[in-house]
Image (cartoon, grey):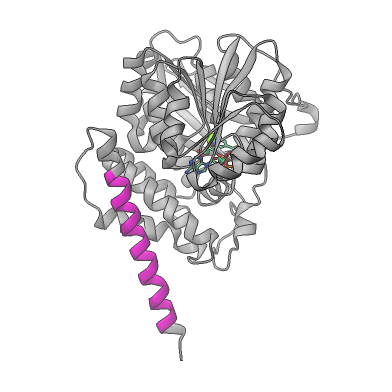
Amino acid sequence: MRSITLLGATGSIGASTLDVIARHPDRFSLFAVAAWRSDEALVRLCARFRPRFAVIADAARLPSLRDALRAAAVPTTALGGAAALAEVACAPECDTVVAAIVGAAGLVPTISAARAGKRVLLANKESVVCAGRLLTEAVRAGGGELLPVDSEHSAIHQCLAGARETDRDVRKLILTASGGPFRTRSDFAGITPEQACAHPNWVMGRKISVDSATLMNKGLEVIEASWLFGFPAGRIEVVVHPQSVIHSMVEFVDGSVVAQLGTPDMRTPIAYALSYPGRIDSGSAALDFPRLGALSFEAPDLRRFRCLALAFEALAGGTARTATLNAANEIAVEAFLGGRLPFADIAAVIEETLNVVDANEPSSIDEVLAIDARARRGAARLIERRSSASLTVSGP
Ligand code: NAD
Ligand code: MG
């Protein structure tokens, strides 16, 4: 029986994880669930799954969570604040932590789980982008495991399963990308948040949906793959595959390419990581090959999708660069979703932030958090400046 802490329980990955857990009550129980501020959704989860703890990161909502749990006669203990996320992630009563918070906010609890030797199911790619070395070192020191939930990395993990000496046997990792909703669009002017969030193959949270539309998601995944599998940027290739059937591939030195396929359903990689090295039913539908018809591939357009090129450059520059890239991206995406930045300007804001924020390689999580904070301030200033400049230009 695995005892699970689910961070980001009210999100898209959270819902898929709960669906898999609910299919296997004999194998999994929930120790704790956590979310940012959606206390009503947390209460519904607690009524259904009866975890020991429910954490609301926004401490101001703790009283309403507590009251609602009491009113519903649910025996779950409510905790509040960011520190409680890290506490439930390292509690001795749980052995598995699903890291499914979105953004760098997931870093500290993910590190906490890694240090405590948990099996960490990593959906929160931003934490490895911000602190790749520190996170992998924490996993090693804690003696636990880090298993990918991201479908591409789960695919690579599965493709590598038979390889004994990864470094010698493998020529390169090939990450597939759907290309997002604007794959064939030449002009990015006037794109709305609704258009950007309408992904052709996956239903996901809003931030990762925008990242998929700019291809920054693939850029973050290249950085994630580099840390998870120990490959430099030069041995990671991205190929656009609009059907999202092949989730990624590994090319070996003998010319063999091994691919992992499946319907685009996050329950498959979640179930794999929960049950690894065994397999369990995930609830996802089987592929219907005759109906699929053709699978197609094309090279990514790094000129239109500048974010992907920026991520490759940042990876070559080290963790200070990737943490800056990530923070600037979070701020730019938030501004786009809030109507304060055109979609077409997201890449420019990230590039300008990388130009103005100059930081040394971080050697602790506190240093990563300091770089993250500086990059956020830098990006916010750049966005502010852009919007006042455009007001001046279009003003009377
Ligand atoms: P989402 O927006 O649907 O859910 C995010 C969750 O994180 C929510 O439960 C929210 O309450 C919580 N959260 C947000 N800010 C928080 C904070 N400051 N403190 C504590 N909790 C906070 O996002 P999602 O699509 O589920 O994505 C979650 C993570 O998984 C992201 O890092 C994303 O890149 C990754 N991922 C998602 C998918 C997918 O299909 N959705 C696929 C691969 C990887
Ligand atoms: Mg992915």
Looking at this view, is 168 or 59 the one in front? 59
- Residue lying farthest right? 291
Residue 264 visible in the current orientation: no
| Residues drawn in magenta | 370-392
Ligand 2 placement by image quarter: top right
In the depicted view, which residue is nearer to us: 295 or 31? Answer: 31
Residue ID at (45%, 40%): 81
The stretch drawn in magenta includes residue 381: yes
Instruction: Please name the predominant secondary structure of the magenta segment in the image.
Output: helix
Q: Nearer the viewer, residue 395 or 11?
A: 11
How far across and down, in percent of the image, does residue 174 sit?
48, 30
Left or right of 141: which side holds 162? right
In the image, taking residue 360 as reference, residue 348 lies left or right, namely right
Q: Is residue 136 visible?
A: yes
Q: Is residue 169 magenta?
A: no
The quarter of the picture where residue 130 lies is: top left
Q: Is residue 2 above or below residue 7?
A: above
Q: Residue furthest left?
A: 360
Residue at x 27%, y 42% (from the top left corner): 320
For the N terminus, give its image quadrant: top right
User: Where in the figure is residue 226, as x and y percent of width and height?
Assistant: 38, 29
| Left-right relation of 210 to 112 | right
- The picture quadrant where one finds residue 277 is top right
Residue 233, x across and y down, in percent: 35, 34
Q: Residue furthest bottom?
A: 396
